[in-house]
Amino acid sequence: MKLTFLGTNGWFDSSTGNTPSAVLETENYNIIFDAGFGLAKADTCLNPDKPTFLFISHFHIDHICGLHTLPKFNFKQPLTIFGRKDLKKLFKTVINFPYGAPLSFLSYKVNLVPLKEGRYTEPFNFVCKQLKHTNGAMGYRLEVDGKVVVYCSDTAICENDKLLAQDADLLIHECAFVPGETSDWGHSNPEEVAAMAKEVSVKKLALTHFGAARYNSLEVRKNAENVAKAIFPNTIAATDGLVLVV
């Protein structure tokens, strides 16, 4: 199982990368986390013959702006998009004229699946929970190919964050704030995420969604990685194009 980071910035694109998207290639599925501008590169690592599932954390623009690139893809099986309970309403607002091509223009079928908090068994076992972020965000815990992969963006550290991450083989977690920074908006800094990963016995931590205005160079990211590693050694600060074997 392989994870490719396509976009690792939060808020806006910059020289350090695109806004959030990552592809998890499993034995039977393509799984995409979020749809920032990194999504436009997804065809470099997707198998078009496999069913594809896109998990959207929330509808802030940096997490959905890549949806307007959906017409470039040629999926041979339907694309299934998971998201919050008002997913269909939000799609009609954003993925429609005048902002972009509506889903009816695509050459393949798209299934929109609104989610409530809880456990699901189709198409594979996964759990979703509300996280702590302005206007809300969903975190996801996937159990696939004998591994547990957790995706949490955007959020401050909270109880649901910990419940999703417990004993995960890989925790993909936002790191919008620089070391020592906090606010009520609902984001995390590297030392908070590392401490949480250690507390709940995560095996590997990948930091992503680096606030583009704060992390204006990859060197600043490297510092965040070092701060986190001092607490939880098996940490990596993701960059666009990074590939991890899970």
Image (cartoon, grey):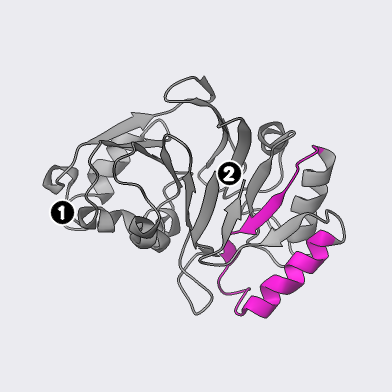
* Amino acid at the residue labelled 2: Tyr
Per the image, the residue denoted by label 2 is 151
Total numbered circles: 2
Residue 140 spot, x, y in % from top left: 55, 36
Find residue 211 and name its label.
none
Residue 51 spot, x, y in % from top left: 33, 36
> Could you tell me which secondary element the residue under label 2 belongs to?
strand
- Above or below: residue 114 compared with residue 194: above
Q: Is residue 110 visible?
A: yes
Q: What crowding class fits label 2: few (fewer than 14 Cα within 10 Å), some (14-19), or many (20 or more)?
A: many
> Could you tell me which secondary element the residue under label 1 belongs to?
loop
Is residue 210 a member of the stretch shown in magenta?
Answer: yes
The quarter of the picture where residue 50 lies is top left
Per the image, the residue denoted by label 1 is 97
Residue 158 spot, x, y in % from top left: 71, 40
Residue 36 spot, x, y in % from top left: 41, 58
* Residue visible at 71% across and 45% down in the picture: 157
- In the drawing, does residue 152 fall left or right of residue 166? left
- Above or below: residue 218 compared with residue 225: below
Q: Quadrant of the C terminus?
A: top right
Q: CA distance from mark 2 to mark 1?
A: 31 Å
* Residue visible at 71% across and 51% down in the picture: 205
Is residue 225 a member of the stretch shown in magenta?
Answer: yes
The magenta span reads 200-229
